[in-house]
Image: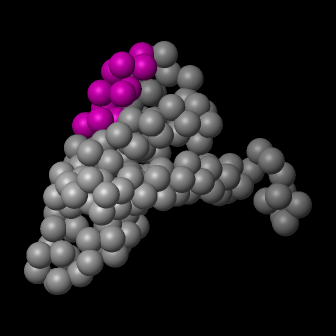
Amino acid sequence: MFKKLLSSSHPVLHEFRKTIKYLIVGGSGAVADLLLSAFLVEVLHVWYIVATTISFLGITIIVFWPQKKWTFRCAYERHFQQMFFFLLATAVALTLNEGIIYLLVERGNWHYFWAIFIAKWIVLIWNFSISRFFVFGKLTKMSR
């Protein structure tokens, strides 16, 4: 049984690899998002809500292709349709992200950087779920 679990075709191992890849791409994006947000706030003196919105959207568009091609190995050819649904999911994620950051900073008196850090972990669950099961999963199967 253990040998079968370790085989490259086992579904559990396949899902584990997909999750690790998502964390690598998403984690890289999250680090870039934190750094860009900090740069916009600290150096350019942009309001933290505007800075995190700009950063979040920019990084999300950049990570779309690695998530599509490497993480989820999605061969779906309607790229613009898929990008539309990815951006729709991102709009929900952005709303969650900004809402959490705003509440932690304005109501909880947290430093914006730590609020961004916490929001990233919460939004990560949403992003992975919607990407895995809809944008790069069910949507692709429904449109064939």
- Left or right, 27 with respect to 35, comes to right
Q: How many marks?
A: 0
Coordinates of residue 68 in the picture (x, y in percent): 52, 33
Coordinates of residue 87 in the picture (x, y in percent): 29, 35
Is 4 rendered above or below residue 67? below
- Left or right, 118 with respect to 18, comes to left
Quarter placement of the N terminus: bottom right
Quarter placement of the C terminus: top left
Q: Can see residue 51?
A: yes
Coordinates of residue 93 in the picture (x, y in percent): 27, 52
Residue at image x 16%, y 83%? 108
In this view, the residue farthest toward the right is 3
Residues in magenta, as a range: 78-88
Residue at image x 83%, y 52%? 7
Coordinates of residue 25 in the picture (x, y in percent): 55, 48
- Please tell me in which quadrant of the rendered image residue 99 appears: bottom left
Is 53 rendered above or below residue 73? below
Q: Can see residue 22?
A: no
**Is 87 a magenta residue?**
yes
**Is 64 a magenta residue?**
no
Residue at image x 20%, y 76%? 104
What colour scheme does the image use? one colour
Residue at image x 16%, y 58%? 47
- Secondary structure mostly seen in magenta is helix
Q: Nearer the viewer, residue 113 or 127?
A: 113
Is 133 rendered above or below residue 42? above
- Please tell me in which quadrant of the rendered image residue 141 appears: top left
In this view, the residue farthest toward the left is 107
Q: Nearer the viewer, residue 144 or 34?
A: 34
Q: Nearer the viewer, residue 76 or 111?
A: 111
